[in-house]
Amino acid sequence: MNLKAFLTNHHENTVLKSCIFGEKIAIFIYKKVLQKHIENISSKQNSMITRQLANVKKDNSQVKNRIRE
């Protein structure tokens, strides 16, 4: 992201949109793991993944709100 910030003359919204894109991919993967591999992971792993998913969603929401400001 540092290169992208440099090339876009440090335009904050461009960098934030790049973050949102990456977070959307992470959310998709977390959901996919929880849906398709639930029987292959322990309850401890399930809790960890669920917690991480919630954190990524919260962070993604905060970044989106920052763009709107």
Image (cartoon, grey):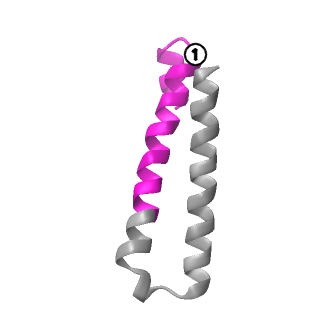
Q: Position of residue 22 (x, y in %)?
A: 46, 43
Q: Residue furthest top?
A: 9
User: Residue at point 60% right, 62% down?
Assistant: 52
Predominant SS of the magenta segment: helix
Q: Which residues are magenta?
A: 1-30
Label 1's element?
Answer: loop
Q: Is residue 54 above or below residue 34?
A: above
Magenta run includes residue 48: no
Q: Residue furthest left?
A: 36
In the picture, which quadrant includes the C terminus?
top right
Name the one closer to the observer, 29 or 11.
Answer: 29
Write down the residue under mark 1. Answer: 10
User: In screen coordinates, is 18 left or right of 59?
Assistant: left
User: Residue at point 41% right, 71% down?
Assistant: 33
Using the rendered view, name the quadrant where residue 12 is placed. Answer: top right
Q: Position of residue 40 (x, y in %)?
A: 42, 87
Using the rendered view, name the quadrant where residue 35 is placed. Answer: bottom left
Number of callouts:
1
Name the one closer to the observer, 34 or 12.
Answer: 34
Other-residue count near label 1 (Cα within 10 Å), few / some / many at <14 / 14–19 / ≥20:
few
Say what amino acid the circle numbered 1 marks: His
User: Residue at point 49% right, 29% down?
Assistant: 17
Using the rendered view, name the quadrant where residue 66 is placed. Answer: top right
Magenta run includes residue 12: yes
Q: Position of residue 3 (x, y in %)?
A: 50, 26
Q: Is residue 58 above or below residue 20?
A: below
Q: Position of residue 58 (x, y in %)?
A: 63, 48
Q: Is residue 6 above or below residue 44?
A: above
User: Residue at point 47% right, 55% down?
Assistant: 27
Q: Is residue 41 above or below residue 27?
A: below
